[in-house]
Amino acid sequence: MKFKIRKVTLQDIKEVYNLLAANRPYVGLNSRYTYLLLAKDFSDTCLIAEYDKKVIAFSSGYIPPARRDTFFSWEIVVHKDYRGNGLQLSLIRQHIKMTGAKFFEGTVNPSNEFCKDNLEKLAKSLGSKLRKRILFSKEDFENDGHEEEVLYRIGPINFP
Ligand SMILES: CC(C)(COP(=O)(O)OP(=O)(O)OC[C@H]1O[C@@H](n2cnc3c(N)ncnc32)[C@H](O)[C@@H]1OP(=O)(O)O)[C@@H](O)C(=O)NCCC(=O)NCCS
């Protein structure tokens, strides 16, 4: 399958929102306004993948102002019908390339085996260290059933 990976635009957001709504769990659904802001002000660090002119994956993130050498990955989702094509890793690699980040950060829920495997694979393929720690605990989510969010920090990265 041939996918086109590009920066998100305002015109994509209706499709992005529907993609997120239909492909849970593990990605929260935030307001449309949030995604419109991402497309407006953070399009340098937010990507989509298209297949046949349809948005089939979305990956958002940003450069934390206090850690400008780091790309922080926020949400990433691949449409159920297109999983198994390594798109999560392709999108993350593209983020690292575009931002020139020395470190990658993202949080994962302990039960999300696919995502954990992919981040382990990423660290290995980059030859970089992987450190894990709990970033947000269940209590931070007022024990509402939300799992803890474990931070995966990978780096330093020497991207080829
Ligand atoms: C995590 C996610 C982005 C990975 O998608 P991806 O890049 O297409 O996955 P991969 O190409 O690495 O898939 C590897 C294998 O796992 C399978 N797989 C991946 N995600 C799966 C899922 N959620 N459920 C069942 N199988 C899944 C693939 O079909 C593939 O199997 P195969 O080797 O037999 O073909 C995707 O599962 C997803 O969108 N999940 C929901 C949101 C999410 O968890 N986001 C990440 C938060 S940290």
Image (cartoon, rainbow, N blue to C red):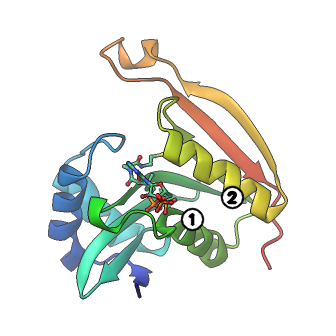
Left or right of 139 on screen, residue 152: right
Q: Mark 1: is the Cβ under 8 angstroms from ligand 1? A: yes
Residue lying at 45% horizontally and 64% vertically, measured from the top left: 84
Left or right of 151 on screen, residue 148: left
Image quadrant of residue 27?
A: top left
Residue lying at 83% horizontally and 69% vertically, measured from the top left: 158
Q: Is residue 65 visible?
A: no
Label 2 with label 1: CB-CB less than 8 Å: yes
Query: x, y percentage for residue 21?
Result: 18, 51
Residue lying at 70% horizontally and 34% vertically, measured from the top left: 132
Q: Which residue is mark 1?
A: 89
Q: Secondary structure at mark 1?
A: helix
Query: x, y percentage for residue 102?
Result: 76, 62
Left or right of 154 on screen, residue 143: left
Instruction: Identify residue type, mark 1.
Output: Leu
Q: Which residue is mark 2?
A: 122
In this rendered view, identify the residue nearer to me: 130 or 83. Answer: 83
| Quadrant of the drawing holding the C terminus | bottom right
| Quadrant of the drawing holding the N terminus | bottom left
Q: Quadrant of ligand 1?
A: bottom left
Q: Mark 2 or mark 1, which has the lower sequence index?
A: 1
Instruction: Identify residue type, mark 2.
Output: Leu
Q: Secondary structure at mark 2?
A: helix
Residue lying at 72% horizontally and 60% vertically, measured from the top left: 69
